[in-house]
Amino acid sequence: MKKIIISFLLLAVTSSYSQELNLPVFTQYLADNPFVISPTYAGIGDNLRIRANGLTQWVGIKDAPNNQSLYADFRILDRSGMGISLYNDSNGFTKQTGVKVSFAHHLILDYYSKQYLSFGISYNINSFKININEFNSGTAIPGSLDPGITDNRSVSNSNFDVGALYRNKDFYLSFNIGNVLEKKIDKFDGIEPSLLRNYQVYTGYVFKGAENNRIEFEPSIYYQFFASDKRSSTDFNFKFRQYNRYEDYYWIGVSYRFLNDQVLEPLMIGPMAGFKKSNFYFGYSYQASLNAIGAYNSGTHVITIGLDFLRGISNCPCTQSPVRH
């Protein structure tokens, strides 16, 4: 009986530790909100930008991961930005809530060729909890637990993210390090790793089309590497935007994710779409699981709702985004 309970505990923790202190990134950043993955984007774009995300993973599987998040960033002075993100993430018997406070500063490398360099830092506070009230031993006695497990386990941690962003006209390249510090594991010793550091590279280019530059094509690549177990994955993305004369737009796209040792065996692939009307933004993304677990679920769904305010307060071109907001 004890082995059964421990097995459930291990499953719950190992399936979620990769998310702890690092909210899982699917396609939220592609909803014209790269601030999701790097603090360096704080203050770039409309002066006040708000995005709310709802994500449901592996629909059809009981207690599958799901999370809700809220992002807001804004300019301070002409060349700096601040941001905040709040999140609530559930995965089986585990739950985490957290907040990130970010600061970014933007520099002009060359005014005439539109080259900019940005640096950012985030301070993160995270609370991680394992709820044993839902555990079941699998025996004929409903709700029976191992007597050695007597209470819920929880721990709080603080950490930092740092990043740099280079922009040259419509090209962008960012490098971000998440969870720079090691994590406390006093109550989970021997079960989960203390090293949750991860490295992220995000790059792309916005091509201008015809019709007075009202059409844009944006291919991009997003790379993640997790130091604890050496896992890494890559997203290949493509987006198309069409603007009208009022600067409203709609967009469609597709994302393809794979582990880097299995390039021809994608983890997920799926379409995306969204629009911006005046200050209101809406986006939707669907990703079909193409690995073994795909036979047991109908995919992952992400909905983004946003508001953009106070455009044009800064006079510095270093706060302008390659994407017209």
Image (cartoon, helix red, strand yellow):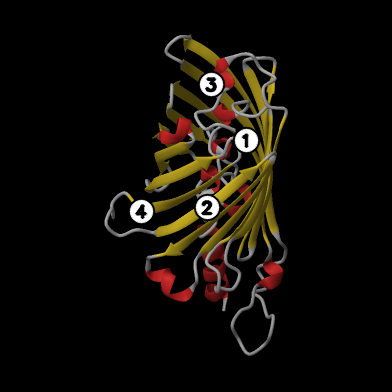
Marks 4 and 2 sit apart, C-alpha to C-alpha, by 21 Å
Marks 4 and 1 sit apart, C-alpha to C-alpha, by 38 Å
Helix, strand or loop for disc 1: loop
The residue that mark 4 highlights is 258
Which amino acid type is shown beneath numbered disc 3?
Answer: Phe
Q: Earlier in the sequence, mark 4 or mark 1?
A: 1
The answer to whether marks 2 and 3 mark residues whose Cβ atoms lie closer than 8 Å is no
Q: Earlier in the sequence, mark 1 or mark 3?
A: 3
Choose top left, top right, bottom left or bottom right for residue 12: bottom right
The answer to whether marks 4 and 1 mark residues whose Cβ atoms lie closer than 8 Å is no
Which amino acid type is shown beneath numbered disc 1?
Answer: Tyr
287 lies left or right of 135: left
- Judging depth in this view, the residue of 219 and 257 nearest the camera is 219
Q: Nearer the viewer, mark 2 or mark 3?
A: 2
Helix, strand or loop for disc 4: strand
Q: Earlier in the sequence, mark 3 or mark 4?
A: 3
Q: Which mark is residue 246?
A: 1
Q: Is residue 116 shown above or below 162? A: above
Q: Nearer the viewer, mark 4 or mark 1?
A: 1
Marks 2 and 3 sit apart, C-alpha to C-alpha, by 30 Å
The residue that mark 2 highlights is 273
The residue that mark 3 highlights is 119
Marks 1 and 3 sit apart, C-alpha to C-alpha, by 32 Å
